[in-house]
Image: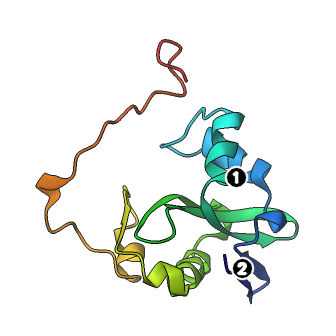
Amino acid sequence: MQIVNTEFNGYLITTDKALMHPADVFKWLSEVSYWSKYIPWEIFMGTFDNSFCIGAIKDGQQVAFARLITDYHSFGYLADVYVLEEHRGKGISKIMMEELFGLEWVKCLRRIMLATKDAHDLYRKVGFKNSNFPERIMEIARPNIYGDNETRC
């Protein structure tokens, strides 16, 4: 896969996992996020290793991250998008999304989905819209799978 390394206002926007800091991403997802709180390290690393990732690095720290769960040919699901609070409002997520959605193979994906609680405007800027057929979309949701001892995986 094509590697992106873009300098942006002192940040390195990259898809090169060798330059990323998985421990920083894990810390934020497992301690701060509402969707992956308590995720075990092994589960996180499986998601990191098996997804196409993009991130922003500044001064040796991972300050932003997103991953595309994909088969690289027809489908993608955008997940785990975040920017550390102290780095928000600087255009980092916008550049990350532009770089990701500007990749030729991503442009050829038939469907890309995501779920968001509060970033609808960001995603509309890169082409997302509400589903035409929300009644067709189903899910199995296990929001406490990492924190509930009875259902822990």
How many neighbours does mark 2 have within 10 angstroms: few (below 14), some (14-19), or many (20 or more)?
Answer: few
Rendered location of residue 138, percent (x, y): 23, 46
Residue 147, numbered label? none
Q: Residue at x 57, y 62 (%)?
A: 67
Rendered location of residue 106, percent (x, y): 49, 78
Q: Dot 1: what SS?
A: helix
State left or right for residue 92 relative to residue 144.
right
Amino acid residing under circle 1: Val
Q: Residue at x 35, y 81 (%)?
A: 127
State left or right for residue 114 relative to residue 83.
left
User: Mark 1 against mark 2, which lies toward the viewer?
Assistant: 2
Q: Quadrant of residue 90?
A: bottom right
Residue 3, numbered label? 2
State left or right for residue 13 relative to residue 111.
right
Comes first in the chain, label 1 or label 2? 2
Q: Residue at x 53, y 14 (%)?
A: 149
Amino acid residing under circle 2: Ile
Instruction: Give above or below for 5 relative to 80.
Output: below
Q: Give whichever of 57, 50 is nearer the camera.
A: 50
Question: Marks 1 and 2, how far apart in space?
Answer: 19 Å
Rendered location of residue 125, percent (x, y): 39, 83
Q: Dot 2: what SS?
A: loop
Q: Quadrant of residue 136?
A: bottom left
How many neighbours does mark 1 have within 10 angstroms: few (below 14), some (14-19), or many (20 or more)?
Answer: many
Rendered location of residue 84, percent (x, y): 65, 61
Residue contact at pointers 1 and 2, CB within 8 angstroms: no
State left or right for residue 87 relative to residue 131.
right
In the picture of the structure, the residue carrying the numbered disc 1 is: 25
Q: Residue at x 21, y 52 (%)?
A: 137
Q: Give whichever of 4, 30 is nearer the camera.
A: 4
